[in-house]
Image (cartoon, grey):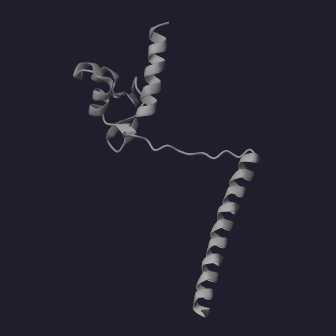
Amino acid sequence: MKELTTNTSLLIVGACILSGAIILSNALTQSSQEAGEQVIVREQPEGPQLLSYLELQDYLGLSDEQIEKVLPKNEGDGVKSQIPYVKIGYEYYFPVKAVDKWLAETEAATFR
């Protein structure tokens, strides 16, 4: 009988601790929202964030000749490019978000 009482008591104490933790968690969440704090949830990107020039060519749907016109070129003391890029080592990569922004700006300038 004593063992049954001890086990029952332990189950009740465990349930009380669990319910107290849930109540405390909800109260903290509610108070932070009332204080105007925003909970930021970052979404994971679905695909690669940097494209190689071949991936860029496929992404934009350009031919070999067309892609050559927008790729970065060495001119004198610097590199000139129509499209945003990142240089890592000796390779050029193109951030997807920057390319999308560049496309929107280019379309807006073209159709004015």
**Residue 71 image position (x, y, % from top left):** 33, 26
Point out the residue furthest to the left here.
Answer: 64
**Residue 112 image position (x, y, % from top left):** 50, 6
Quadrant where the N terminus lies? bottom right
Q: Is residue 70 left or right of residue 8?
A: left
Write the residue at 71% across / 51% down.
30
Relative depth, front residue between 62 and 35: 35
Point out the residue furthest to the right here.
Answer: 35
**Residue 87 image position (x, y, % from top left):** 38, 39
Relative depth, front residue between 100 and 77: 100
Residue 23 vertical placement versus 85 (above, below): below
**Residue 98 image position (x, y, % from top left):** 45, 30
Report the number of discs.
0
Q: Quadrant of residue 15?
A: bottom right
Q: Quadrant of residue 46?
A: top left
Write the residue at 60% across / 78% down.
11
Relative depth, front residue between 55 and 31: 31
Point out the residue furthest to the front here.
Answer: 1
Q: Quadrant of residue 96?
A: top left
Point out the residue furthest to the bottom here.
Answer: 2
Write the residue at 70% across / 62% down.
24
Residue 51 vertical placement versus 3 (above, below): above
Relative depth, front residue between 32 and 94: 32
Residue 16 vertical placement versus 31 (above, below): below
